[in-house]
Image (spheres, rainbow, N blue to C red):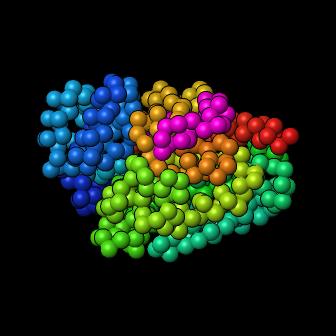
Amino acid sequence: MKLIVLLALFALATAKHEMYTGWKSYFVKLVDEIQSKLFASLADKYELDILSHPIIGREGLLLVKPEYNDNFIQDLISIGITFRIHSEDVKSELDYDDLMIEQQHTDLKARNVGRQLPYDNYQEIEAIDDYLDSIGRQYPDVATVVNAAESFEGRPIKYVKISNTNFEDESKPVIFIDGGIHAREWIAPPTVTWAIHKLVEDLTESDLLDNFDWILLPVVNPDGYKFTFNGNRFWRKTRSTDQNPLSTVCPGVDVNRNFDFYWNSVGTSNSPCSDIYAGSRAFSEVETRVVRDILHEHLHRIALYITMHSFGSMILYPWGHDGSLSSNALGLHTVGVAIATTIDQLSLPNFAKYVVGNSALVLNYLASGGAEDYAHSIGVPLAYTMELPGFTNTMQGFNLDPRYIQQVCNETWEGIVVGARRAGDLFKNKRL
Ligand SMILES: *[C@@H]1O[C@H](CO)[C@@H](O)[C@H](O)[C@H]1NC(C)=O
Ligand SMILES: [Zn+2]
């Protein structure tokens, strides 16, 4: 019976993801700086869609269009870059992912009352918003849901403020975490909603509310997120069409290139059809402005800002636009290592160990206008981009089976707890 249902679902699913017919995905491994440079030029030449940046000694994962496949592989071989195939057919990989998600929904329904929790599975934006609203209704003393703005397509951009002193105790440091800046990075929003769950519904360590106020924004880019469910699974940007005459054909801006810090100077594109399009100007996107406004509103007491991305198991800190170190590099590194060490101890053998470092140096790639750099540039002492884990050494990579969402949420949460406490200590010292 179960098999019949699965097969029926599979037949339905196959009409989706047509646009990825013939695409292939590869793991590549770089051994030195020379290969790293050569790879960067291949990425441009063949318009590679990079899901995880290859760093020296650690595989990356990328998608290749059908028309470029043969030449790309020839170039890899002639340069001597090691690669292995991740998927012979990206479309069928995506169909399989859908099946796993459906299966997870079915299993969950069998086990619980049917409430869809945003960290149980990869959920649609509406289920995430419903969860936030229900938290606000059930726990008005600690949780306040803010409808910050409407996205370009008119969806609410919601975040939750969590405090046992109504955000009025100015001596408390604020911890700000967001997810879903990049629409397709589906593992990011659950780590933020799980943090909400742990702070509101299942608070086990009271110092987290006694000593901190929290701002949790699970989906910065709801339009893009929606589009990854009903349009293009690998959509990364917003969905705005007002940036450039070409934006009606190629919508969207990369929110993580849209902040006003060395805006559009490196690692960005002026073409609306690019996945790293910086927009017509800094803060052109309402989604970017929501993050900016939260940072500014609470700037005097934000001790820690983490923006959740995937994947690669990396904790990255400024400056990403030029690879130089900030005056707080020691603090950034020390707290980053504390977070990484905590997570690594709880992690699975198939998840890579975390790498901690300056984002440009770790990735061998400069990028300007990112959220982490902007937050730090205006005075947030600890600002990180976290690249959450994906499976290594198996075929899975980016497309993490929904059965592992809970693992990622748990281990990431323990890292956040350690990061918050360390940030709190540094913040206290700063204020003395
Ligand atoms: C995650 O943590 C919760 C407690 O917060 C625990 O009940 C659950 O078993 C953990 N799950 C995994 C996969 O580690
Ligand atoms: Zn990202």
| Residue 287 seen in the figure | no
Q: Is residue 398 toward the left or the right of residue 297 in the image? A: left
* Residue 319 lies in the magenta stretch: yes
Residue at left 42%, top 63%?
A: 279
Q: Nearer the viewer, residue 196 or 41?
A: 41
Which stretch did the figure color magenta? 311-337
| Residue 373 seen in the figure | yes
Q: Is residue 14 toward the left or the right of residue 390 in the image? A: left
* Residue 186 lies in the magenta stretch: no
| Quadrant of the frame with the C terminus | top right
Residue at left 81%, top 49%?
A: 172
Residue at left 53%, top 53%?
A: 261
Location of residue 32 (image quadrant): top left
Location of residue 394 (image quadrant): top left
Q: Is residue 291 toward the left or the right of residue 359 in the image? A: right
Above or below, 164 against 72 in this view is: below
Q: Position of residue 296 (x, y in %)?
A: 67, 59
Q: Position of residue 205 (x, y in %)?
A: 77, 41
Report the label total.
0
Q: Position of residue 152 (x, y in %)?
A: 47, 72
Above or below, 297 against 79 in this view is: below
Q: Position of residue 428 (x, y in %)?
A: 81, 40
Residue at left 71%, top 61%?
A: 297
Q: Is residue 200 toward the left or the right of residue 45 in the image? A: right
